[in-house]
Image: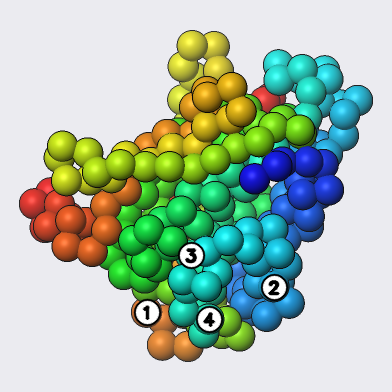
Amino acid sequence: MIFDDIQPGANLGRMELNLDPQTVADWRRLFPAGAEDEDIRLIPVGFLAVIAMRAYTHACPIRPPGNIHGEQSYEIISLPEIGSRVVTDVLCTDKEVRRDRRWVTFGTMTRAALGHELLFNGVMKVAWSK
Amino acid sequence: MLVDQPAIDAYARITGDFNPIHLDPVFAATTPMHGIIAHGTMSLGLIWQMIARNLGTPAAAARMTVRFVSPVRPGDRIVAGGAEACDGRHSIWVKNQKDEFVIHGHLEVGGQAERRKAAT
């Protein structure tokens, strides 16, 4: 998807993800410090980025190579339990050209698959390479 | 944290983000970054660790906003830190071995985030 084809306001899709213990363990191997301070029933808070990125790459599978993450925000309501399933909706919320650079903003909204309570929102701003 | 290519490769597998700017040195050399850079959210993981260690897991009503201001490259050593700002929020950052900011932003936890949200 090139910049000219991107439509702000478009709903790009939904992804359901199983928060499997193995993937969480892989994440904790990269970021072991701090694990002793976390509730081991819940995903590590940094794992939110994994959920958001998986949903983004699923919803937007054909991206020009060389895109760069410029800004990120999260609003966390609660953390899901390891082993649970979450559903993430991905939206394109904005695009702009600033200082000769193309920027695209995506929003993610992640809910529990069971019960549908909102878990966290994310906003990512990406420098789009083409 | 030492950021090396095996760590970047592992992060790509975990997130499913196989952008060649993180993985392919030949391609990455042709980009404005002039070489491989780590995923921005990989460095962000270090901030979350620091928060968990110093403030406890922000399991409810936390709001974080960050900018990725400089690339992190294989071989870089990065460290996360933060401080309470005068407005009650926490400034947060990641720096590299040259003491350059690679990420900076702010965090609100618990009542801070709730109060600010109610006021907006």
CA distance separating discs 3 and 2: 13 Å
Residue type at numbered disc 2: Ala
Q: Residues within 10 Å of mark 1 (few under 14, many from 20)?
A: few
Secondary structure type for disc 4: loop
| Chain where mark 2 sits | A
Mark 2, secondary structure of its residue: helix
Does label 3 or label 2 sit earlier along the sequence? 2
Residue type for callout 4: Ile
Residue B28 badge: none
The mark that comes first in sequence, 4 or 3, is 4
Three-letter code for the amino acid on which mark 1 is drawn:
Glu
Distance from disc 4 to disc 3, alpha carbons, whole Å, reads 11 Å
Q: Which residue is mark 3?
A: A45
Disc 1 + disc 4, Cβ < 8 Å: no
Using the rendered image of the protein, determine whether residue B38 is visible from the camera's viewpoint: yes
Vertical placement of residue A122 versus A19, above or below = above
The tag on residue A40 is 4
Which numbered disc, 1 or 4, marks the residue closer to the eye? 4
